Image (spheres, rainbow, N blue to C red):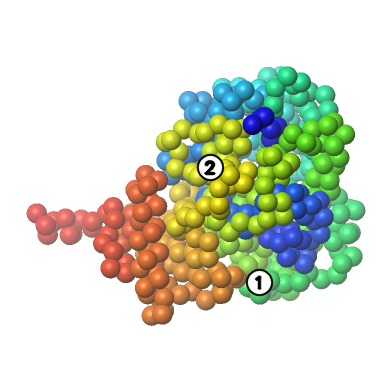
């Protein structure tokens, strides 16, 4: 097999169903729909640890976040890690990275950098290993004030206009002028949108607003939202400052922010159309696989919550589309319900080159299925996790969670080292909006016992020492025994 060029477009905080082809009535994504028609769309793709930093860690290393105790925010990737870039270079690929990195600064932790400082602090080559062509930055979260760095030049360069447009322009320049002519390339384009703050172009925002009020999801009550993450109530945002004690203000601001969220997705879609044009004009379309995905979702008011880091589908569910010519991607327009999580990406990207990742990785190489060499894989489920939170004012600082997601079931536990307890059980085939928790219902007892056992198996196979309390006939696992019980046993 001739090795294909590979372009991965990674967006930030776009949930799995925020696509026209996935049925969301609030957004128009004709270019992403066309991309899906040229490949396979994974309808059960999940972010293992649904937050920006741990997703990127696992994608770049192939390792679970629990293997390094990676927190939700504030982590510096060790230069000793073997990265995705390293693996692809060993397959003969030129490697390029454009956009947000978010694996170097201590932003978000005590004594860390401000957003502006993080954007203007160069990332040394030792900490972005494996990517030879570099047009990146740590993070910014301001779409009209983004700086990036060119390779090892320590002087930041201002990205003109809206960040989404500017980063896609840098990718187009790489394809038109900077890519090597004598070897295949792997390009990872990492765009911050539609992560808040909610800053879309006026044209895109008007396009969404002109369609009228949003169609609400069945599990959304915007007026019932009790906590607004700081990035959700910027006074300069599309609806101004929120009054958390006024339900009407809460609903108004949440609605306006979600309209801007969808407008940012439509800007991404517009740029995906431009990327298609560049691939055609440069003659690369016939030898290039394009992957589109997100690092995690956005709750958008589902279950009265905003943001991410929760086990709900709107938070863990991510779009994953792989498209390309017939010899690289079979089953054009197909969907696959096999559960997929972050740790599958590293071996799959290497597999798309014709290589194979080290046997030490527990993730699944989906490339043979994508190429049509085998049937859709069958697996019990994939691990979901929240490993640790370093910010005392955020959820899951005192207790964390684990879960297992199959093609139609989800089971989660929550707790601390004394042993996590059963928390949620949903049958997604009959309850896609997770409104009927079966975990304490007698009708769900046998199912819960089975899923608890499957979760134990996943924790064992992934080297996770997470503590579980006894549940559904299963004994405790790694739970801390209270001092009083230790004394009684002596």
Residue 363 percent coordinates (x, y)? 49, 44
Residue 202 percent coordinates (x, y)? 89, 53
Q: Which mark is residue 365?
A: 2
Q: Does the image show residue 436?
A: yes
Q: Residue at x 61, y 37 (%)?
A: 352
Q: Which mark is residue 315?
A: none
Between 114 and 5, the one nearer to me in the picture: 5
Q: Residue at x 18, y 59 (%)?
A: 484
Residue 402 percent coordinates (x, y)? 44, 56
449 to 176, vertically: above or below? below
- Decide which of tag 2 and tag 1 comes sooner along the chain: 1
Quarter of the image for residue 143 reads: top right
Number of disc labels: 2
Between 433 and 222, the one nearer to me in the picture: 433
Quadrant where the N terminus is found in the figure: top right
Residue 139 percent coordinates (x, y)? 67, 38
* Residue with the mark numbered 1: 220
């Amino acid at each position: 097999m001739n090795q294909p060029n590979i372009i991965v477009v990674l967006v930030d905080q776009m949930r799995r169903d925020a696509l026209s082809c996935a049925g969301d009535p609030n957004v128009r994504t004709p270019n992403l729909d066309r991309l899906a028609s040229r490949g396979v769309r994974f309808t059960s793709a999940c972010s293992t640890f649904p937050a920006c930093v741990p997703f990127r860690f696992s994608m770049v290393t192939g390792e679970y976040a629990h293997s390094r105790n990676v927190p939700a925010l504030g982590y510096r990737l060790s230069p000793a890690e073997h990265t995705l870039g390293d693996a692809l270079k060993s397959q003969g690929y030129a490697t390029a990275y454009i956009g947000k990195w978010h694996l170097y600064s201590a932003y978000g932790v005590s004594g860390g950098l401000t957003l502006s400082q993080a954007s203007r602090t160069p990332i040394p080559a030792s900490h972005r290993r494996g990517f030879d062509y570099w047009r990146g930055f740590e993070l910014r979260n301001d779409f009209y004030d983004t700086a990036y760095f060119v390779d090892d030049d320590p002087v930041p360069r201002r990205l003109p206009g809206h960040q989404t447009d500017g980063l896609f322009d840098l990718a187009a320049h790489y394809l038109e002028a900077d890519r090597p002519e004598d070897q295949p390339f792997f390009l990872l384009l990492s765009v911050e949108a539609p992560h808040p703050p909610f800053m879309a172009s006026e044209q895109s925002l008007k396009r969404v607003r002109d369609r009228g009020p949003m169609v609400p999801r069945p599990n959304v009550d915007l007026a019932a939202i009790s906590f607004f993450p700081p990035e959700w109530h910027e006074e300069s945002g599309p609806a101004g400052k929120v009054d958390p004690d006024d339900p009407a203000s809460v609903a108004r601001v949440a609605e306006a922010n979600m309209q801007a969220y969808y407008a940012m997705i439509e800007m991404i879609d517009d740029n995906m159309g431009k990327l298609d044009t560049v691939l055609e004009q440069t003659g690369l379309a016939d030898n290039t696989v394009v992957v589109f995905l997100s690092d995690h979702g956005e709750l958008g008011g589902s279950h009265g919550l905003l943001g991410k880091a929760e086990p709900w589908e709107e938070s863990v569910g991510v779009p994953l589309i792989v498209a390309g010519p017939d010899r690289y991607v079979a089953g054009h327009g197909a969907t696959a319900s096999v559960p997929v999580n972050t740790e599958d990406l590293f071996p799959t990207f290497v597999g798309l080159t014709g290589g194979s990742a080290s046997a030490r990785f527990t993730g699944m190489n989906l490339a043979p299925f994508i190429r049509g060499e085998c049937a859709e894989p069958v697996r019990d489920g994939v691990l979901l996790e929240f490993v640790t939170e370093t910010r005392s004012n955020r959820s899951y600082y005192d207790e964390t969670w684990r879960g297992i997601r199959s093609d139609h079931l989800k089971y989660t536990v929550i707790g601390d080292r004394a042993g996590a307890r059963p928390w949620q059980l949903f049958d997604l085939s009959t309850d896609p909006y997770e409104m009927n928790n079966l975990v304490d219902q007698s009708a769900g007892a046998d199912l819960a016992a089975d899923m608890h056992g499957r979760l134990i198996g996943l924790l064992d196979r992934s080297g996770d020492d997470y503590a579980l309390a006894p549940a559904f006939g299963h004994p405790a696992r790694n739970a801390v025994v209270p001092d009083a019980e230790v004394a009684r046993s002596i």
